[in-house]
């Protein structure tokens, strides 16, 4: 497994080792001891799976009082995965990182607590699996508008398919973020 650091402290790209042969391939998508040895010391408590069609954009989401670190992977298809630093005391507050995750490259993105997360689908369809370090808590959701000019994410999808909720999210500058996002 190869760990690639990004310019945002704590956000890393993981390139798991895969074993290919004429039958297909085998890979570990998570091994607690190996991830811990790589500095990713999390306890994941919930696994999620989403299915989306091309041009769908989900995000940018976070939880307020129950922040979640996430380990994200595209199981089928291809996505552009994004993390935005929402830690008020961080030197990179408001900055983002994006990467392609696909069934073909088998990469993962680890996003620590204190980041908003979103992705858009570039293939016809995509299944995205992600592990979380805290449970989803209804009513604790927060979000940032995907097109926030203060963040200026260079999304590869210009007219995305959005949920009603995501289309009405506020800009980062309109949020009151507290110590929960500083972890």
Image (cartoon, rainbow, N blue to C red):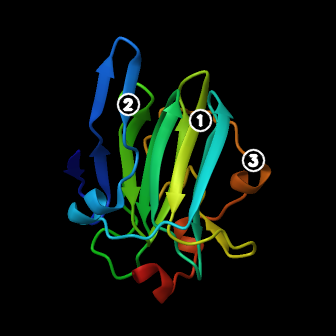
Q: Quadrant of residue 91?
A: bottom left
Q: Secondary structure at mark 3?
A: loop
SS class, disc 2: strand
Residue at which label 2 appears: 26
The x and y percentages for residue 6 are 24, 54
Q: Are marks 1 and 2 in contact (CB under 8 Å)?
A: no
Mark sitting earlier along the chain (3/2) = 2
Q: Residue at x 57, y 51 (%)?
A: 146
Q: Residues within 10 Å of mark 2 (few under 14, many from 20)?
A: few
Q: Which mark is residue 127?
A: 1
179 is higher (above) or lower (below) than 103: below
Residue 45 makes an appearance in the image: yes
Q: Residue at x 32, y 70 (%)?
A: 41
Q: Nearer the viewer, mark 3 or mark 2?
A: 2
* Numbered label attached to residue 49: none
Q: Earlier in the sequence, mark 3 or mark 1?
A: 1
- Of 116 and 173, nearer the camera is 116
Name the outermost residue toward the top: 22
**Which residue is label 3 attached to?**
163
Q: CA distance from mark 3 to mark 1?
A: 17 Å
Indicate left or right for 152 with 148 as reference: left
Whole-angstrom CA distance, mark 1 to mark 2, is 18 Å
Q: Nearer the viewer, residue 177 or 73?
A: 73
Assess whether mark 1 and mark 3 are in contact (beta carbons under 8 angstroms): no
At 32% from the left and 76% from the top, the residue drawn is 90
Residue 32, quarter of picture: bottom left
Residue 151 visible to the viewer: no
**Which sits in the foreground, 69 or 166?**
69
Q: Is residue 88 above or below residue 121?
A: below
């Amino acid at each position: 497994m190869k760990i690639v650091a990004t310019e945002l402290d704590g956000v890393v790209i993981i390139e798991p080792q895969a074993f290919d042969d004429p039958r297909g391939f085998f890979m570990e998508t998570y091994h607690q001891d190996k991830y811990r040895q790589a500095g990713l010391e999390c306890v994941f408590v919930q696994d999620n799976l989403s299915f989306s069609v091309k041009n769908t954009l989900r995000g940018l989401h976070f939880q307020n009082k129950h922040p979640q670190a996430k380990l994200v992977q595209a199981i089928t298809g291809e996505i552009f995965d994004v993390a935005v630093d929402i830690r008020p005391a961080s030197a990179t507050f408001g900055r983002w990182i994006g990467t392609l995750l696909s069934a073909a490259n088998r990469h993962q993105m680890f996003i620590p607590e204190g980041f908003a997360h979103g992705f858009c689908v570039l293939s016809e369809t995509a299944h995205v699996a992600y592990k979380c370090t805290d449970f989803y808590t209804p009513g604790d959701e927060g979000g940032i508008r995907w097109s926030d000019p203060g963040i200026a994410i260079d999304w590869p999808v210009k007219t995305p398919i959005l949920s009603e909720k995501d289309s009405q999210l506020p800009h980062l500058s309109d949020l009151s973020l507290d110590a929960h996002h500083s972890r």
